[in-house]
Amino acid sequence: AAVAEELIVPPVQISYTQHLIDGKFVDAASGKTFPTYDPRTAEVIAHVAEGDKEDIDRAVSAARKAFDEGPWPKMTPYERSRILLRFADLVEKHNDELAALETWNNGKPFEQSAKAEIPMLARLFRYYAGWADKIHGLTVPADGNHHVQTLHEPIGVAGQIIPWNFPLILFAWKVGPALACGNTIVLKTAEQTPLTALYAAKLFHEAGLPPGVLNIVSGFGPTVGAALASHMDVDKLAFTGSTETGKIVLELAARSNLKPVTLELGGKSPFIVCEDADVDKAVELAHFALFFNQGQCCCAGSRTYVHERVYDEFLEKAKARAMRRIVGDPFKQGTEQGPQIDSEQFQKVLRYIKAGIESDATLECGGERFGSKGYFVQPTVFSNVQDDMLIAKDEIFGPVQSILKFKHLDEVIRRANQTHYGLAAGVFTTNIDVANTLSRALRVGTVWVNCFDVFDAAIPFGGYKMSGIGREKGIYSLKNYLQVKAIVTPLRNPAW
Ligand code: ADP
């Protein structure tokens, strides 16, 4: 891998490490804290309040009070919309601090944080601000002499659990629709990345969000996460994370109060390079589809299927591209790949690489840690990968590209669909018939044709099969946070 130059100095300090409950930063009920790290060096950068069931109880009561007594659900939709817009303005104003904090705690390239993710955070909230005053029910022409209407009401207190790979983007996917629809929230951030959501929530209060509407409790899954998922006074649960944990929270929700659950889970997305493909472009896109965000994307194109006619050329160029990938300090200009998030993920990725080598796949490049400190992994490419190998079946969540060969379209459809996952797929072809056939045949929530990872606020995202339940973003995300009430009134004079 290549090496980056010049350091971009992060102008940031860590100001918020406590829970945010009822508009105030407070210590954990137990007084406990846990360390949070810089994945470049594995050094502790702050100690953060460590929540437990009692903190969740406090946060849920604050959210309940804010929902029942207002002013949030009683404000006009336009007033709520204005607060979301003011928040987006403040995000823009604090772009570089938010980006630096995100990179410091997560390890993703600063340029990605500053130029793409924080601007997207503002964009997502402006999108949802646009919905806030456009949510309304129907009048229904039912049989009989009745006037029938529906009200679309907020559900109440939303519990939201997010992971560490896109801390602020996923904050927006969860918080945006919930607030636009008038709900109140208790959010649990990932234990690896607790810092930026607290900073963002501070800005939200500066924008005029009333206390208790957005509460944040930091801490671990089996304690804080489980307490939230099983809380009797939480009306809705939204979760993003692994399929394994998704099953746990769905069960906790069912066993407690049957709160409806949306899940955005793992994936093993195929990226299909067809025989007509411009190989240089296909290589670049397939590389991006897998390596983006250190390979830590639930939708990563982690099974690169290449038609036999272009396979050899593709392989040679994919390997050369991976070897050119610039790995290093995410604060340096030009860095494409920073460290993995933590020791656990780092070890897991290295274990999968070992499994790949042992399974007779061909290691083309990489295969080891990069450097001697922090959690960096060399961009790694395997060829001759077979569908039944562990590296072709499991979600690796790291910079490991698996290249598989195919011959016929029917064959690649069958093989691409042969997985419990169904989050996304990439298709690379100039043949419209092939594009249409693949788009319809693939059992996934998103098909990117000649593009990948296009995440506009309006485009719905979510999984088929064990990749999840429900859709986030776009118009589809609103129904996760709304109840429909039918109101039926007899008509006094049926003639009119
Ligand atoms: P990952 O393996 O990527 O860390 P997880 O699914 O474990 O993915 O984590 C996603 C989120 O789910 C995190 O906020 C984590 O703390 C939370 N979590 C983990 N275990 C549980 C659990 N048993 N109950 C509720 N939330 C959990």
Image (cartoon, grey):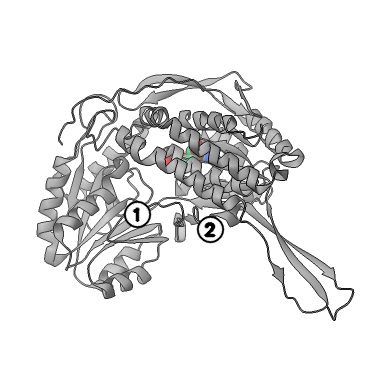
Q: Quadrant of the C terminus?
A: bottom right
The foreground one among 490 and 429 is 490
**Whether residue 106 is visible:** yes
Amino acid type indicated by mark 2: Ile
The foreground one among 179 and 62 is 179
The percent coordinates of residue 325 (x first, y second) are: 18, 40
- The residue that appears at 46% across and 57% down in the rendered structure is 460
- The quarter holding residue 12 reads top left
Q: Taking 462 as reference, is 292 above or below it?
A: above
Label 2 secondary element: helix
Horizontal arrangement in the rendering, residue 363 relative to residue 15 (left or right): left
Q: Earlier in the sequence, mark 1 or mark 2?
A: 1
Residue matched to label 1: 268
The percent coordinates of residue 156 (x first, y second) are: 68, 46
- The residue that appears at 68% across and 56% down in the rendered structure is 483
Label 1 secondary element: loop
Residues at discs 1 and 2 in contact (Cβ within 8 Å): no
The percent coordinates of residue 146 (x first, y second) are: 82, 73
Residue matched to label 2: 475
**Whether residue 190 is visible:** no
- The quarter holding residue 494 reads bottom right
Q: Taking 138 as reference, is 222 above or below it?
A: above
The foreground one among 379 and 411 is 379
Amino acid type indicated by mark 1: Lys
